[in-house]
Amino acid sequence: MKKITPLSYQEMADQLNRANEILETLRLGQADAVIGEHEVIMLRLREAENELYLNTEAFRQSLEKLDSLRRSEADAVIGEREAIMLRLREAEDELQQNTKLLNEAISGASLINENVAKAARANFELQYLRDRFWKAESRHLVHTQSPIMQKVFDQIRSVAPTLTSILLTGETGTGKGVMAKLIHRHSSRSENQFISVHCGAIPDTLIESELFGHEKGAFTGAVAKKLGKFEIAEGGTLFLDEIGTITQSVQIKLLQILQEKIFSRVGGTASIKTDVRIIAASNSDLKAAIEEGRFREDLYYRLNVFPIEIPPLRERIEDLPLLVQGFLETRNIGNNKKILSVHPAVMKALRRYSWPGNIRELENLVERAYIIEQSTELTPESFPSEIFSGGSTAQVHLNTTLPLAEVRQGAIESIERQYLKQLLAEHKGKIDVSSLAAGIGVRQMHKLLVKYKIDKSKYKNSSRKTRRKKSEL
């Protein structure tokens, strides 16, 4: 074992000094470390304090902002509540106003309903009185679907009971003569004569004598006194048709009658008083005749006290079915055959036609078709081709909006109907002979007659001679 040499005092002192130095160094280092850490801690504390201050300030600002928001929200809520209350009050006012209006409307509706009921009763009473005004034999004439003609009949109803002079205007064939008779029939003079004079059909040399009469020897051929129409119509109505054709001398005498109610016969000197209502009619423009010097203006205004314009048929086409039916009913009276209806194709063509001859042309066409027709229905074959826009009456009006199959079927049915009618006419309505001639059975013939609504009994009195007349017409 190695022997330890004892240290000297100096050595021990040196070692102690070195130990103290080391210790002092360690202490200083530890102190510096502690001081540095303390400073760090203090720095962190200051930073923490600053952050706390900042956060506290931010928190304070947040609280202030929150408080402001709360106050604003409270103000907004209060404002909204006030707005809502205002709206509620406005709604209540509006409700009250609407309730008032509703009550007024209900009262008004009741009043309106009451007025409507009164108006309906008044209209019914008026219609009743209107119907009572028209005499039974005239009611078929005043039956109309046309507003224009309704106005004409209203005018006639108003003026008929008076003594006023009337001027009827309108195209040829519109029924001015019929309207004149209707006026007379519903006037206070209906029990006296209605005299009609077609002024345009009487020569100028005779018109004066025809209207006012003449004395014996007034002119060559006047071998006896003759009464004129004004004397014959005394107390009644004189209808002067085509008044625009009378001569100037006749116009002067007519004006004298209208002004003074007196006239003289041709060749006479005595003044004759007259009590005649004058209804004049013209299809020409009398105002144009005045401008041309052919008609006296003063006479025109004397005649035109109550003008009534009769519309042409094309302006009252809605009355066409009524007129046709009326003509058929008239023709059926006193005839063996009864035609009750009109084929739809015929009615369609009649509606499209322009009717230059107006009601007179329609009546003539219906009469002609009535004579020709052998069934209970007026068919296209009984009317002239011009009624169907240039097409033959034996042709079916082609509707290009329909498919070819439907058009073909329609044409076949039209031909079959025409064939069966002609066949029955030729064989006097005998089914067995007609079916044999057609090459079909009796049973099939009956089915076809039922299909086309053909009455065989209508042909029992017909003959081939009748059919030949039909083709000639």
Image (cartoon, helix red, strand yellow):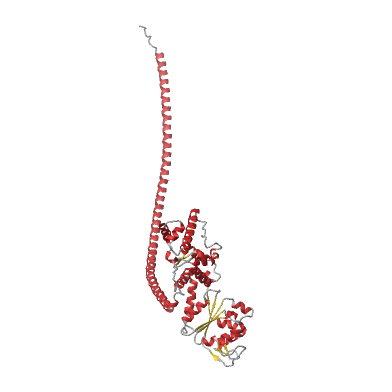
Task: Give the position of the N terminus as an image quadrant.
Answer: top left
Q: Residue furthest top?
A: 1
> Residue 243 falls in which quadrant of the image?
bottom right
Inspect this view and state whether residue 88 appears.
Answer: yes
Task: Give the position of the C terminus as an image quadrant.
Answer: bottom right
Is residue 3 depicted above or below 37 in this figure?
above
Coordinates of residue 297 in the picture (x, y in percent): 60, 82
User: Which residue is drawn at the image coordinates 41% and 33% (left, top)?
Assistant: 41
Q: Residue furthest right?
A: 292
Q: Nearer the viewer, residue 446 or 221?
A: 446
> Residue 198 falls in which quadrant of the image?
bottom right
Coordinates of residue 316 in the picture (x, y in percent): 50, 70
Coordinates of residue 150 in the picture (x, y in percent): 47, 73
Coordinates of residue 59 in the picture (x, y in percent): 41, 44
Inspect this view and state whether residue 312 appears.
Answer: no
Q: Nearer the viewer, residue 343 or 108?
A: 343
Q: Nearer the viewer, residue 67 or 383?
A: 383
User: Which residue is drawn at the image coordinates 61% and 77% (left, top)?
Assistant: 288
Q: Is residue 37 left or right of residue 351?
A: left
